[in-house]
Image (cartoon, rainbow, N blue to C red):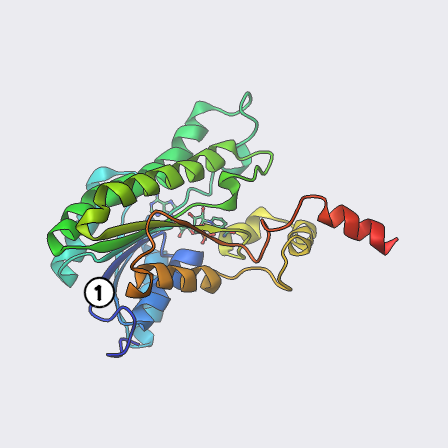
């Protein structure tokens, strides 16, 4: 870890939601590529587990407990990263409110608090981290921001409308940031994962549903956090320096085929 040849050597990264799943995998990959990583999560113990794993491999990371929907806590996290690592070159937003899944139901039935809770973390969290990181990136002459959206932003799951809306908002926000700050050397892109097996999704989908999901990817396996982390590495590294305001889908082809394909396959098998 942290070798001179790393693709992020000399960079400082702030990763939210880095105590679990995709955020944790991204923090680990970034540290392996030489970045100093602030591992931010609302759950400090989860952030510390990620940091322990990074340090065991010889990487540089610090845990930081912050709720991304609280502006003071976000400001504190950014200040800490700047003091400890000298700036924030790379911002990665993966924090997601998972406790509202069961209540995020059809619009006429859901309580407004569900909408506010989902939007506060998944969308406003990206606004707040960008708001506090951007002045440092502007002073440094550049930076890279990647925000997590989801296929759910444009393929309805029939249910989870607040999540879908938050993730669609992330795309609009990211394109705005790309245009507003592009001339200052700052890029902002979006990762849209399909189904990725993570601690959150393992709880969300039954074994039978997981089989259905497998049937709907073009690849012979489901996605893993590392699949998204490697795409995040590309978007954070200078290799993608001319890519700005884009959505990179990481879904094993789940969104690539026409909707009638599974039915045609079933007919062909009869
Ligand atoms: N896993 C998938 O299949 C999938 C698919 C599409 C999009 N995504 C998106 O990718 C991102 C990561 O997904 P994951 O499955 O790894 O999630 P996860 O639930 O495993 O991890 C999310 C992390 O965010 C933290 N968190 C929750 N609320 C927070 C808050 N207010 N402030 C700071 N941290 C907070 C949690 O403690 C957790 O560690 C999310 O934005 C998710 O919406 C995931």
Give the farthest residue toward the top. Answer: 108
Left or right: residue 169 versus residue 85 is right
Q: Is residue 241 visible?
A: yes
> Residue 34: x and y, percent?
27, 72
Quarter of the image with the N terminus is bottom left
At x 12%, y 58%, the residue is: 83
Q: Is residue 20 visible?
A: no
In which quarter of the view is residue 239 placed?
Answer: bottom left
The residue tagged 1 is 11
Identity of the residue drawn at 84% across and 53% down: 268
The x and y percentages for residue 46 are 37, 57
Could you tell me residue 50's position as x and y percent? Answer: 35, 63
Which class describes the residues within 10 Å of circle 1: few (<14), some (14-19), or many (20+)? many
Report whether the residue tagged 1 is closer than 8 Å to ligand 1: no
Which residue is rendered at x = 45% and y = 59% of the image? 228
Front in this rendered view, residue 3 or 252 = 252
Q: How many marks?
A: 1
33 over 85 or under it: above or below: below
Left or right of residue 150: residue 133: left
SS under mark 1: loop
């Amino acid at each position: 870890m942290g070798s001179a040849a790393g693709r992020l050597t000399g960079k400082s990264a702030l990763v939210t939601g880095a105590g679990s799943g995709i955020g944790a995998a991204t923090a680990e990959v970034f540290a392996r590529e030489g970045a100093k990583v602030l591992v931010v999560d609302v759950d400090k113990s989860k952030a510390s587990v990620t940091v322990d794993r990074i340090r065991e491999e010889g990487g540089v990371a610090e845990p930081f407990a912050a709720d991304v929907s609280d502006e003071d806590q976000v400001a504190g996290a950014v200040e800490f990263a700047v003091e400890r690592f000298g700036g924030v070159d790379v911002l990665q937003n993966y924090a997601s409110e998972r406790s509202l899944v069961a209540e995020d139901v059809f619009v006429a039935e859901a309580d407004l608090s569900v909408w506010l809770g989902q939007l506060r973390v998944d969308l406003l969290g990206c606004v707040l981290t960008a708001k506090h990181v951007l002045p440092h990136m502007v002073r440094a002459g550049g930076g890279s921001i990647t925000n997590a959206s989801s296929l759910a932003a444009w393929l309805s799951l029939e249910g989870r409308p607040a999540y879908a809306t938050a993730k669609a908002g992330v795309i609009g926000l990211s394109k705005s940031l790309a245009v507003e700050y592009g001339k200052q050397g700052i890029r902002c892109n979006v990762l849209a994962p399909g189904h990725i097996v993570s601690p959150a999704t393992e709880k969300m989908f039954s074994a039978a549903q997981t089989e259905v999901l497998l049937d709907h990817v073009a690849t012979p396996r489901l996605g893993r956090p590392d699949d998204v982390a490697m795409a995040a590495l590309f978007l954070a590294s200078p290799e993608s320096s001319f890519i700005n305001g884009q959505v990179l889908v990481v879904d094993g082809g789940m969104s690539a085929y026409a909707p009638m394909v599974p039915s045609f396959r079933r007919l062909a098998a009869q």
